[in-house]
Image: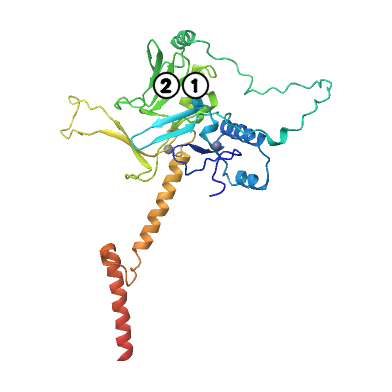
Amino acid sequence: MPGDNCSVVGCGTCRKTKAIGIWKLPAPRNDAYRKWRQDWLNVLKKYRVTDKSFQRQIDNDKVFTCQKHFAESDIEITVSEKMTKKRPKFGAIPTLNMPQKSFEKVPTTPRPARPVVKEHPAVDVSTVKRVCHKSFTEFCRRAGSLKSIKEWDICAKEDRMVFKKSAEPSLCLPQVELVVDDSLGFTIKVYGWLLPDDHILYTKYLRSMRNITLSDLVKELAESFVVCPGTEQRELHSNIVHHVIPMSVDPFDCSDNELENFSFKEYWRSRKCQLLVESDENCQCCKEQSYSMQRSSQAKQSRMSEPAHLYAPVSKTVPDRLKLTNKRLRSNIENVVDYLL
Ligand SMILES: [Zn+2]
Ligand SMILES: [Zn+2]
């Protein structure tokens, strides 16, 4: 299909070229992603004229760029049982195999020198970042003496520091686990599950303790985020995963004889669940999943309550619908008989 090809002029990669990854512009899900999307698009615009058809692609979010234009180190590869998935790392923009600029042949005349305009320097908080933690040793020292982290279980290892916070003592997994490695990168787990890479907590601080202090991060985790309650559907589906947290049961501490053998706490989540959300509601992905499943089950129900087509194959039609068809036929015949008599 036209428009589904790589947007770099002269590059022949199309979406059907299986082995070569081809990606849309990143979705503008938050400020960081909006900036990434714009940076990426700006690179493409630098090498081609934004004519009507390209503008249409932009408007319809049909701008694709293939992996040939990304450095190998900018591509993230995840291998699962079923497939190998490639995607650009957060912030990566196309740099390789770009065309010669067609409108660059005219030598550009240097701009006349302009007097320096003195303006109030715009202080952008996001660019003037103070370094919150400088090194892993310094981080460990400060973490040890921090008061706000008292309710967390701290475990220091040679190459990482692990902070765990439990919600209920009977659950076998901590509700939130924060791991800071010796390069000051951090990883968050929620009941044992890793937060998705595009989570706001990662993108906001670029996943590094250099950009946020431990006390602020801990405070944010405790005060601004709750665990996503998941989807409304509680059944297996290709887009839904079952998040089970085992509970520990003390066999000697049970008053009644009915000992629960398989105690657990559970969530049903959309595969793209954000795990931690800023409101009490479920995350956008779980919400959308609930909604789409609700709609399809309603559609199915309304189909089920209607009689099948007269010539519907019997082997492939549910008995209830055949019964309805039968009933309708019989009543039709009765009407005809009534009429004739
Ligand atoms: Zn390409
Ligand atoms: Zn969710």
Q: Earlier in the sequence, mark 1 or mark 2?
A: 2
Q: Residue at x 43, y 41 (%)?
A: 286
> Quarter of the picture for ligand 2?
top left
Query: Can you tell which of label 1 and label 2 is closer to the viewer?
Result: 2
Q: Are marks 1 and 2 in contact (CB under 8 Å)?
A: yes
- Find the residue positioned furthest to the bottom: 341
**Which type of secondary structure does the marked residue at label 1 adopt?**
helix
Question: Dividing the image into 4 quarters, which one contains the C terminus?
Answer: bottom left
Q: Residue at x 49, y 33 (%)?
A: 278
The amino acid marked with disc number 2 is Leu
The picture places residue 25, in percent across and down from the top left corner, at: 56, 38
Q: Is mark 2 within 8 Å of ligand 2?
A: no
Q: Which residue is mark 2?
A: 178
Q: Nearer the viewer, residue 11 or 256?
A: 11
Residue 274 position by quadrant:
top left
**Which type of secondary structure does the marked residue at label 2 adopt?**
strand
Up-down relation of residue 60 to residue 110 (above or below): below
The picture places residue 32, in percent across and down from the top left corner, at: 57, 30
Q: Is residue 209 visible?
A: yes
The picture places residue 136, in percent across and down from the top left corner, at: 47, 11
Q: Residue at x 65, y 45 (%)?
A: 55
The picture places residue 298, in percent across and down from the top left corner, at: 39, 56
What separation in Å lies between label 1 and label 2 (alpha carbons)?
10 Å
Q: On the picture, is 288 further left or further right than 241?
A: right
- Find the residue positioned furthest to the left: 257
Q: On the picture, is 189 further left or further right than 8?
A: left
The amino acid marked with disc number 1 is Leu
Mark number, residue 217: 1
Up-down relation of residue 338 to residue 141 (above or below): below
